[in-house]
């Protein structure tokens, strides 16, 4: 009995970490972008693109690490597109984000057709080498990367000139501008980091705990990450806990279906799968009004008559 | 006169998108160690000119020389490097950050030993190195001590008073070792006593040999402190005069282009019965802290009650609570005896209250709406504008007629009432806001900063409207940060400090000095229970 | 006219009760005013500019899509010709596809006008279609009542699905983008699928796809023009366009919704309850999306299939964005995307280009519409280039033509790189590439050519952009680009047996000539460079 308990909790922790990693990574990405003042609902699209790029690159090179590298490149490209439209060209950030989501969904489906000639899923690729941890079991290296990123992000955000300027760009861009720092550059940095992290999150989903790419495989995880970031109050530690919490809920919704004694639930698996989505709605509904960065969503126009 | 010029601006043109000419061919030379006044009405192009000098705005044409050398600033960083510092009218401070963070932003100190080791790849990696907050705090404390600008480096900006925030701005400049200081309307938010203190600080700067440019639209200030005064009007330079050779009257005429009457002509008020009465009102601000404490007062038919106070002492919360935008914590509000404490704005309007919000672009107008649509905002649900079953439909015909009448009555200058209101000038936009509030003939008018940012002509116009309304028997509650406005227009003056009413005076029985002390909370005239009567 | 001005006068004094028949005439008058107002020049001009921008964005999106097709080995000319031909052969399919797009587009646009981004129209569409299907097969009703009731319930259920996010947005500040998306994920893959697979599954069918029983024929929407596809839903869509247009333009509710959408603080200060408006507009938005699902079920599918829509709700975002959130724009945008969808199947079957290409185009269209600056920039450049070319053709033409040649050259290079990369992919050589390069000189050549093509393809794009902007650096990149074009043309033909010799040589040599010529123009004749004309 006790062994089963240990196994069970070990499995839950493993699943929470595995499923929470993409949420936390993308949430951190969203945080960098939103702290700099750019709404990034494109996380979903960036993750999808990252997931596809990781699989495609591993498919051709038989090396999952080139997959991660390709994911980063794809994330940077999408981040640059979002950045150019919403920062340099002062476009509507939400519309631009939606455009990226739609583009990524269409493009990955198209490329599935082009590369593998199938409509639903890619061929199987080698996954990232997992690390065995006592009790918990196999853990993806990207999970460790995620855990290591938390203090790095915190340090970057609160203890360096970079972080100070990034936060200033999101709180009051005109102040940053009068201090002689380019608001556009810092917002671009924020969006680029955001794209990179979101794409790594996508790679975790496709070659971290899966081994293939399927259509629309991110299934709203980008939005869950966004919610985790809001729930975590736009800071890395909060995002970590909120992301792992949503990961835990996902783990539960998987786990319950296999847990002995709970077989009768299988007919209702749809409802169990809804748990993370419902929990986001509940979470956003019950928390106190969280305070987003003040200048978020507003393009900074320098040459405006005062 | 000067052997060396600190700043030379030659033939500066600045044209904004939409062909708005903010500066036309301005040539201005400012000597080393001079205190130079830059005088002009709101919208005369003073701030734009200084932003061009500071590198915040690009110029359309012209040359800028600093200490005789031609420069071409791409960003304020270049200006800062040459020792230019600027305090903007709206403080460039981030409320949720600490004093230290605000001061070092853009000039963050790093650990010297770290940067020495990383010499070769420094520039690109610099911002990702740890900030040396300790050395920054030390330097701030040193500057504070040397210049008599005491400040707590750990305090958050949002917890500081406006006067202290300005201090932070000055420290920010000194931290960057600036010796050319540009101050944009530094006195707008200060009490007279704080203004004196500021001028003393500037006096010490002058002795240290710093060059100071003081932007202002008030006549008194440059006459107190400046060596020379340059007057701008509608983007053009009218002239530069020495202080000793000029007078307030001459400056005023240069500024406006015609002789100016300093006082608004008005007859004594004939107040009758009470319209608005506020009893023991308590209101909280956005952060849930008490902003208005136990305020009681009355406004009578046919009088203007002015509320004086330094910005951020609860006056905005007070007027929002009366209008129903903000929840009353406890206390009561009555209009002609009717209890209106819980009324929302729509019901307040129906009760006969008009409201001129404080910021016309943020709260007053919908900039993408047409002038016509803005003129009926708030009344759209009432006949004759709403028509058809259950007042569901808009009546475009009546809206047009009504708008045309208001446009004529209030002399609003526009091309077409169907064009977005953003195409109107600031003064005309404010006239729209005023016309909208006054159009339905209210019993009580709440006017919050009704002339902020307007030129002399528009200000005079609004003042005359207020006084005409008063003479027609409307009760007016006027909130303004401009002490002169309060003193010229009001029949009684209430002073607010930290959310409490500290005095009610008539303009005759008080003077600027006393009002200043009251606003600074250094003197409290009457306990609040006496204020009701 | 006299009637209304009388009303106005009495309104200025006090407000009298209104009579119904008076309001009817004023309403008709106000409708007339609206219609004539639409044809006023500046309104018409604004609409035309909007259409022009939308068309420019579509053209740019199609250009980038062609690049992607080139890169992935499809022929854009074949793709577009089969798409256009296929769509024109069956115009009824265009309008059949447009029907739900009109409704979901209106849904997104209506919410957008109230300042909300209803990204979850897909979920509301599914809930609406499921509800309509349930009414369709469960209830037994007479012929007119049945579809009406099904449509009504479909719309209301769709509205209720948006009601939850609306309440959370209004009272808890939860961002509607996240919550409506979550509601969509709950509805589409889980809730409706579960219903169709479980309790409501058609017991008589053996297909594995979850689906409900067929609806009764009494609930069918009639076909239009004897088409197998097109049904009465299209008329409903048109009616909704008119309805939303009247709602936004002519009703108090629409006015208040727009006010909240454009400036919430100002609307609130004017007595409009923003929370109420948020709830109502998001509910109505959900209703429209639900209606979109219901008409498709009643008009075409006649039963609910899991996953039947494949993103009609998301397409609604594209349609709304392209139509600048105006009802008329939505109608045009929906017909345009109906056209693309109708042509997608022939494009796939005849032209052998996957239908997913349309999704890519959609995303690109949204991206280009999101940044009107790109289009604006291009339009401005074109105008100033046209002027310059007319004035000084000898100086401007080489630079202008040069930039065009750089663009064409870079496109060919990129296409070449893509096809060479494709060869590597097909032969599955990428994993062993490092060793192959070292051992096989042919492979090394191949990879070198490939990299050169990519690098100079990108440089070509830069040269195009920079020459258009008159940046001096572009000239220096232009010469090597032309030389590489010539070299690659030779290499491609001689070593790899390609067919690009003639085009690359022609473009390379002409580019070379233009590069030298521009150099002479710039250096010798002193054209002023630096982004300004």
Image: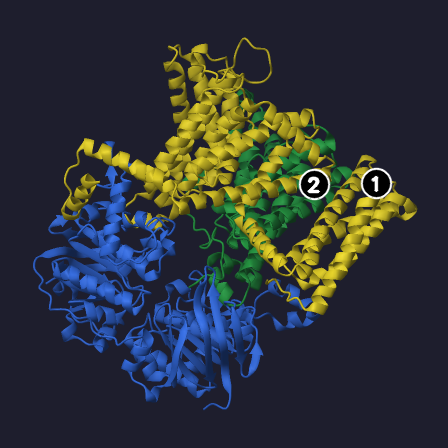
Chain colours: A green, B blue, C yellow
Q: Residues within 10 Å of mark 1 (few under 14, many from 20)?
A: few
The circle on residue C499 is: 1
* Chain under disc 2: A
In the image, A154: left or right of C510? left
In the image, C181: left or right of A59? left
- Residue B355 visible from this viewpoint: no
In the image, A292: left or right of B294? right
Q: Are marks 1 and 2 on the same chain?
A: no
Return the residue at label 2.
A54
- B139 or C406, nearer to the observer: C406
In space, the residues marked 1 and 2 are separated at their CA atoms by 34 Å
Instruction: Please say if B243 is above or below C516.
Output: below
Element assignment for label 1: loop
Q: Residue furthest top?
A: C204
Image quadrant containing the C terminus of chain C = bottom right
Instruction: Please say if B29 is above or below C452.
Output: below
The circle on residue B179 is: none
On the image, which quarter does residue C259 sit in? top left
Q: Residues within 10 Å of mark 2 (few under 14, many from 20)?
A: many
x and y percentages locating residue C133 in the rendered image: 46, 18
- C144 or B174, nearer to the observer: C144
x and y percentages locating residue C87 in the rendered image: 60, 26
* Chain under disc 1: C
Element assignment for label 2: helix
Instruction: Please say if B40 is above or below A266.
Output: below
On the image, which quarter does residue B357 sit in? bottom left
């Amino acid at each position: 009995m006790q062994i089963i308990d240990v196994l069970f909790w070990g499995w839950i922790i493993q699943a929470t970490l595995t499923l929470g990693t993409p949420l936390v990574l993308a949430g951190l990405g969203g945080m960098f972008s939103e702290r700099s003042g750019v709404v990034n609902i494109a996380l979903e699209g960036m993750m999808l693109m990252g997931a596809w790029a990781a699989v495609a690159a591993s498919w051709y090179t038989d090396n999952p690490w080139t997959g991660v590298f390709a994911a980063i490149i794809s994330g940077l490209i999408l981040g640059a597109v979002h950045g150019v439209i919403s920062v340099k060209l002062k476009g509507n950030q939400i519309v631009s984000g939606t455009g990226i989501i739609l583009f990524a969904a269409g493009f990955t489906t198209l490329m599935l057709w082009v590369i593998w000639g199938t409509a639903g899923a890619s061929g199987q690729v080698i996954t990232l080498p997992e690390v065995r941890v006592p009790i918990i079991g196999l853990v993806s290296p990207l999970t460790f990367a995620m855990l290591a990123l938390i203090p790095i992000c915190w340090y970057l955000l609160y203890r360096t000139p970079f972080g100070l300027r990034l936060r200033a760009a999101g709180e009051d861009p005109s102040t940053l501008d009068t201090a002689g720092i380019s608001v556009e550059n810092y917002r671009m940095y924020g969006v680029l980091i955001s794209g990179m992290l979101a794409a790594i999150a996508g790679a975790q989903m496709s070659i971290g705990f899966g081994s293939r790419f399927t259509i629309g495989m991110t299934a709203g995880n980008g939005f869950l990450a966004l919610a985790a970031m809001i729930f975590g109050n736009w800071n890395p530690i909060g995002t970590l806990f909120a992301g792992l919490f949503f990961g835990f809920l996902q783990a539960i919704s998987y786990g319950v279906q296999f847990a002995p004694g709970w077989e009768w639930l299988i007919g209702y698996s749809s409802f169990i799968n809804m748990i993370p989505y419902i929990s986001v709605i509940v979470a956003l509904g019950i928390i106190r009004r969280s305070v987003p960065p003040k200048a978020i969503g507003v393009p900074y126009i320098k040459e405006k008559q005062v | 006169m000067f052997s060396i010029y600190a700043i030379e601006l030659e033939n500066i043109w600045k044209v904004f998108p939409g062909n708005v000419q903010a500066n036309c061919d301005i040539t201005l030379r400012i000597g080393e160690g001079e205190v130079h006044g830059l005088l002009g009405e709101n919208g005369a192009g003073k701030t734009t000119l200084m932003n061009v000098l500071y590198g915040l705005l690009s110029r359309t044409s012209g040359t800028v020389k600093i200490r005789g050398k031609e420069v071409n600033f791409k960003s304020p960083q270049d200006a800062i490097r040459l020792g230019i510092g600027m305090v903007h009218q709206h403080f460039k401070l981030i409320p949720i950050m600490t004093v230290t963070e605000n001061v070092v932003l853009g000039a963050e100190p790093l650990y010297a030993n770290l940067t020495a080791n990383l010499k070769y790849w420094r520039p690109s990696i610099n911002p990702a190195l740890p900030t040396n907050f300790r050395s920054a705090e030390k330097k701030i404390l040193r500057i504070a001590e040397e210049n008599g600008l005491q400040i707590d480096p750990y305090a958050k900006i949002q917890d500081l008073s406006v006067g202290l925030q300005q201090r932070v701005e000055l420290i920010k400049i000194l931290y960057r070792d600036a010796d050319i200081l540009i101050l944009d309307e530094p006195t707008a938010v200060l009490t007279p006593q704080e203004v004196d203190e500021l001028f003393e600080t500037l006096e010490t700067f002058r002795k240290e040999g710093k060059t100071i440019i003081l932007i202002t639209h008030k006549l008194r200030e440059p006459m107190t402190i400046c060596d020379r005064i340059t007057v701008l009007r509608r983007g053009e330079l009218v002239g530069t005069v020495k202080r000793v050779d000029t007078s307030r009257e001459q400056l005023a005429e240069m500024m406006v282009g015609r002789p100016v009457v300093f006082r608004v002509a008005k007859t004594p008020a004939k107040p009758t019965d009470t319209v608005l009465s506020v009893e023991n009102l308590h209101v909280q601000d956005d952060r849930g802290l008490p902003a208005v404490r136990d305020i009681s007062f009355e406004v009578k038919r046919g009088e203007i009650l002015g509320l004086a106070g330094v910005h951020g002492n609860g006056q905005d919360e007070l007027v929002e609570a009366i209008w129903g935008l903000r929840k009353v914590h406890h206390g009561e509000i009555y209009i002609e005896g009717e209890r209106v404490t819980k009324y929302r704005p729509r019901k307040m309007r129906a009760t006969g209250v008009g409201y001129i919000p404080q910021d016309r672009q943020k709260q007053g107008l919908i900039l993408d709406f047409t002038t016509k649509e803005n003129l009926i905002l708030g009344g759209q649900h009432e006949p004759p504008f709403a028509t058809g079953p259950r007042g569901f439909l808009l009546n475009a015909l009546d809206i047009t007629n009504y708008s045309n009448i208001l446009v004529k009555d209030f002399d609003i200058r526009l091309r077409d009432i169907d064009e977005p209101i953003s195409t109107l000038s600031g003064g005309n936009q404010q006239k729209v806001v005023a016309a909208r509030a006054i159009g339905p003939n209210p019993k009580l008018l709440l006017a919050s900063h009704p002339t902020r940012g307007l030129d002399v002509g528009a200000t005079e116009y609004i003042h005359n409207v207020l006084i005409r309304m008063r003479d027609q028997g409307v009760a007016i509650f006027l909130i303004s940060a401009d002490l002169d406005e309060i003193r010229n227009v009001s029949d009684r003056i209430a002073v607010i400090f930290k959310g409490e009413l500290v005095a009610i005076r008539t303009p005759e029985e008080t003077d600027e000095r006393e009002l200043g002390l009251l606003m600074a909370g250094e003197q409290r005239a009457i306990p609040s229970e006496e204020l009701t009567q | 006219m006299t009637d209304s001005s009388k009303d106005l006068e009495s309104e200025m004094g006090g407000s009298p009760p209104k009579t119904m028949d008076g309001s009817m005439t004023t309403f008709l008058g106000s409708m007339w005013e609206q219609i004539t107002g639409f044809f006023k020049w500046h309104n018409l001009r604004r609409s035309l500019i909007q259409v022009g921008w939308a068309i420019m964005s579509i053209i740019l999106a199609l250009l980038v899509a062609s690049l992607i097709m080139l890169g992935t080995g499809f022929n854009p000319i074949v793709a577009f010709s089969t798409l256009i031909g296929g769509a024109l052969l069956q115009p009824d399919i265009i309008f059949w596809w447009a029907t739900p797009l009109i409704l979901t587009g209106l849904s997104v646009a209506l919410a957008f006008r109230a300042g909300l981004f209803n990204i979850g129209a897909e979920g509301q569409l599914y809930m609406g279609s499921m509800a309509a299907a349930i009414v369709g097969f469960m209830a037994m009703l007479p012929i007119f009542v049945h579809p009406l009731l099904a449509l009504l319930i479909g719309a209301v259920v769709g509205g209720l699905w948006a009601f939850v996010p609306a309440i959370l947005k209004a009272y808890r500040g939860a961002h509607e983008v996240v919550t409506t998306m979550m509601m969509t994920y709950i509805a589409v893959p889980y809730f409706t699928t579960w219903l169709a697979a479980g309790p409501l599954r058609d017991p008589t069918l053996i297909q594995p796809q979850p689906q409900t029983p067929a609806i009764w024929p009494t609930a069918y929407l009639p076909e239009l023009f004897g088409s197998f596809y097109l049904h009465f839903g299209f008329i409903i869509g048109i009616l909704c366009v008119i309805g939303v247009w009247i709602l936004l333009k002519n009703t108090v509710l629409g006015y208040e919704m727009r006010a909240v959408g454009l400036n919430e603080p100002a609307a609130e200060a004017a007595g409009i309850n923003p929370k109420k408006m948020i709830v109502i507009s998001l509910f109505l938005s959900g209703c429209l999306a639900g209606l979109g699902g219901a008409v498709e079920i009643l008009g075409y599918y006649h039963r609910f299939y899991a996953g039947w829509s494949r993103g009609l709700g998301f397409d609604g975002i594209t349609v709304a964005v392209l139509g600048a959130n105006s009802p008329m724009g939505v109608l045009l945008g929906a017909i345009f995307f109906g056209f693309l969808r109708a042509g997608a199947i022939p494009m796939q079957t005849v032209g052998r280009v996957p239908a997913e290409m349309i999704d890519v185009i959609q995303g690109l269209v949204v991206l280009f519409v999101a940044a009107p600056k790109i289009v604006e920039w291009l339009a401005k450049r074109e105008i100033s280039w046209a002027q310059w070319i007319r004035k000084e053709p000898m100086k401007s033409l080489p630079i202008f033509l040069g930039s065009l040649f750089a663009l064409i050259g870079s496109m060919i290079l990129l296409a070449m790189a893509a096809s060479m990369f494709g060869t590597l992919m097909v032969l599955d050589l990428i994993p062993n590439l490092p060793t192959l390069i070292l051992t096989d000189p042919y492979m090394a050549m191949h990879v070198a050519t490939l990299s050169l093509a990519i690098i100079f393809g990108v440089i070509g794009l830069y040269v195009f952009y920079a020459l258009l902007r008159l940046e001096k650096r572009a000239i220096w990149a232009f010469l090597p680009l032309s030389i590489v074009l010539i070299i690659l043309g030779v290499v491609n033909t001689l070593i790899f047996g390609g067919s690009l010799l003639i085009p690359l040589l022609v473009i390379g040599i002409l580019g070379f000539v233009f590069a030298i010529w521009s150099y002479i123009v710039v250096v010798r004749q002193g054209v002023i460079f630096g982004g300004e004309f």
